[in-house]
Every structure is written in structure tokens, then in C-alpha cells.
Image (spheres, grey):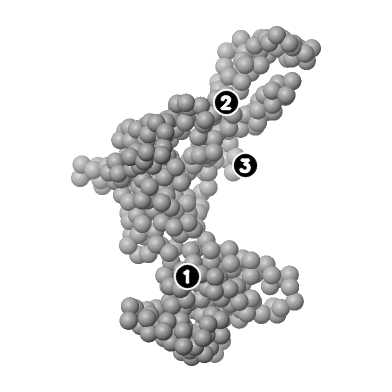
Amino acid sequence: MTDFIQMIADLVRLGLLGDQASIRRLASRLTKASDKQSPDEVRLRELLVPLLSESEPSRSLRRSNDGRTHHISRESPPVDDSSFFPLVHVDEADEAPSPFLPNDVERVVQQVVAERKRPQVLQAAGLEPTRTLLLTGAPGVGKTMTARYLAAQIGWPLFTVDLAALVSSLLGKTGQNLRQALNFGQRNRSVLFLDEFDALAKRRDDDSDVGELKRIVNVLLQEIDRWPPTGLLVAATNHPELLDRAVWRRFERTLSLPLPDLALRHAILIRTLATHNQSLADGDVTTLAIATTGMSGSDIGRLTSEAIRDFVVGNDPHLTPILTARALNYLKRGSEAQRISYAGLANAMLGMTQREIAQHLDVSHVTVGKYIRHWATTNSTSGQDLRPKRKAGAQSNGKKQ
């Protein structure tokens, strides 16, 4: 009875997803008689058999309230035959925030977008647009945001492969699911996104892995080779060192997304503050940009949002001290390289004394002196355009109105 109830729940879920093909497969399983059937199961079987004998109804396009035809209506994403969970999630957002990327990386991203918007220029030169793109970098640097931005700018839906649904304990099933997901992306003009790519494309010379994972890599190589120019395959990984060597050669472009530098951290802080209807004086933003050295864009966004939450519901009248305290606590727990960078920048750009920096980091001023000398020998002062402005009428300091 438990399996029967679960199948009914799966049937409802698939109906809500609009996946008619999977509904018919699951309904067919429900019509198969078992040795011990309850009266309810017998009655359900009697009702389903004539329904399934009818021809499959034609599928009409579903339209949203704004009259826009949704891509998902034309073909439902594939599902795992055992769990009936979708292997691909579809995002049809018309807009997506631009990621904060270094100039050289941003240039390539914009070029990929331009190739899709001006395909005739490439065709005239006997070329095709970029088909495959590999993004590498630490967690939180903007890989997923870049994939979403690409899809929105090109005007295609973003298909994100669900690894949890894809991977199966059944022999050969993971490879079959992977091929279904990739074929779905090939058939539909889209940006197909493979996050945590190292889980699928791990080195085949790793003796600790079973043969099933090696077969998955072979499936990947075949499907990437035959990826059509009508779509864009984007893969992302936090661990590029784990990827099979043959995988690298299959990608036409590879981009390494670094942790944000001082200028990007400054921009991330301003955008995050503005998102929550907050602003700080430029000098305070610069101080925070220095204090968040070594943090990813995601980390900075989360830290800022948490501080604003405390600010708006708490009794503290100023946001700046809350943000600064959180950033400094992060620095104290971080690596020595982060503290060296903070000490050097705070001294060079903000004119802070060694004793002031020592109080922020909870170390001796002698240690700070070593940090500053170490930073000075390996770095030149950067970001001079971000020096705190001392003009009248500076931005708000985060005081509650």
C-alpha cells in the first residue's frame, strides 16, 4: 500500500509539472495487477485502463499572464524513470543581474553574447558561435550567476541539470540519465548548465573510482563533441584539478573566475546595499572593501545582508559599525594572507597606524609591522580611485531615518 500511495503522489507531482509522457508511464505501472490488490487499487485500475487506451492528446502551448509563450510548454524536461524527479530545471527569466567579473573575463562573456546576437557575421567568416564554455573558480565567485546572465542576455531559457536526480545507484542508469538531460538541451535552443561538473567528469585514471564513473565520462565526451551550434553548454567546477584531461580539450572556451579584487568588492558592496535600500559614505564602503579581502562575492553579499537584517530590526542607529565588526570577525578567522592584505591596504590607502590595525585584527603592532612590510614587497598600492572622499555631502553613513 505504501508504494501505491507514493505512486499516486508522484502522479500528482508530474501532473503539476505538465510532464504528460512520464504521467502515462507511471499510470501504466499503476494498471499492472499485483497478487494482493486492495479494492481501491482495483477500482483505480478500472478507471485508468480506458484512459490510457485513448490516443495521446495534442499538446497546446501554455501561455503566461503576460502573453509570453513558455519554452517548457513545448517539451517537458526528462525525468528519472525510478524517482520521477525531473533531470533538468528550467529558468526562463527575462533578466538577470550581471556578475562582477575582471575585465578580461567580462570581455569573453560579452563576446559569447555578441556571437549569439550577430550569428550572420560569424557565418560570413565561415565560423560558428561558441558552443561550449567551462567556468572554474572558488565557490561564490559567480559561476552560476554568469550562466544565468548568459541565458538572459541571449534570450534563451536556462536548463540546469539536477545532479541529485541524475545520479543513480543502478548500474548504467546515471549515464542514461545524463544522456537524456544533454539530449534535451540539444533539442531545445537553450543554455544548458552543468554545475559541480567535477562530479561527472572526474579523471578516469583515479583507481578509487568504479567503472561506472568512467563510463559517465565517456558519455560526456561523446555528447560534448556533438553539441550543436544552436545551443550553449556551460559547465562549472570548484575543482578543476579533478577533471579528466580529455574533458578540457572538448571545451572551446575556458574561463577562470578569481576572487573579487578591491574594485570589484567595492562594486559588490554598493550593489548589495542598494538592493536593500541602504547606502554608506564612499570612505566607509572603501574600508569595508578592504576588510572583506579574500571573500567571494557570495560571501560579501551574505555578510552584508545579515548585517542589514540586524540593523533594521535592532537598536543600533548606524549600519557601518555592524558591517565593519562582521567583516573584521571574518578576517580574524581567515588566513594569514588575508590579514597581510588587509594590513597593507589599510595602511597604504586609509592611513591607519599599525596600532589601529592591530586592534582590528587582535594581534600585536609588531606583527602588523611585519604584515605591512611583507605586503609592500609583493604588492604595489592599487585602487587609488577608491580612496575615501572627504567632500561635503557624502553618501549616508547608514544611519536610520
Label 2 neighbourhood size at 10 Å, few (<14), some (14-19), many (20+)? Answer: few
The kind of residue on which mark 1 rests is Ser
Which SS class for mark 1? loop
Q: Residue at x 51, y 49 (%)?
A: 94
Label 1 neighbourhood size at 10 Å, few (<14), some (14-19), many (20+)? Answer: few
User: Residue 171 location in percent, x, y?
Assistant: 47, 26
Q: Are marks 1 and 2 in contact (CB under 8 Å)?
A: no
Query: Distance between the Cα atoms at labels 3 and 2?
Result: 34 Å
Which SS class for mark 3? loop
Q: Looking at the picture, does residue 261 appear above or below residue 351?
A: above
Q: Is residue 307 left or right of residue 209?
A: right
Q: Residue at x 61, y 11 (%)?
A: 54
Label 1 or label 2, whichever lies nearer to me, is 1
Q: Earlier in the sequence, mark 1 or mark 2?
A: 2
In the rendered view of the protein, which quadrant contains the C terminus?
A: bottom right
Q: Earlier in the sequence, mark 3 or mark 2?
A: 3
Q: Residue at x 64, y 11 (%)?
A: 32
Residue holding disc 2: 82
User: Residue 101 location in percent, x, y?
Assistant: 40, 62
Q: Looking at the picture, does residue 265 appear above or below residue 24?
A: below
Label 1 or label 3, whichever lies nearer to me, is 1
Residue holding disc 3: 65
In the rendered view of the protein, which quadrant contains the N terminus?
A: top right
The kind of residue on which mark 2 rests is Ser
Residue holding disc 1: 335
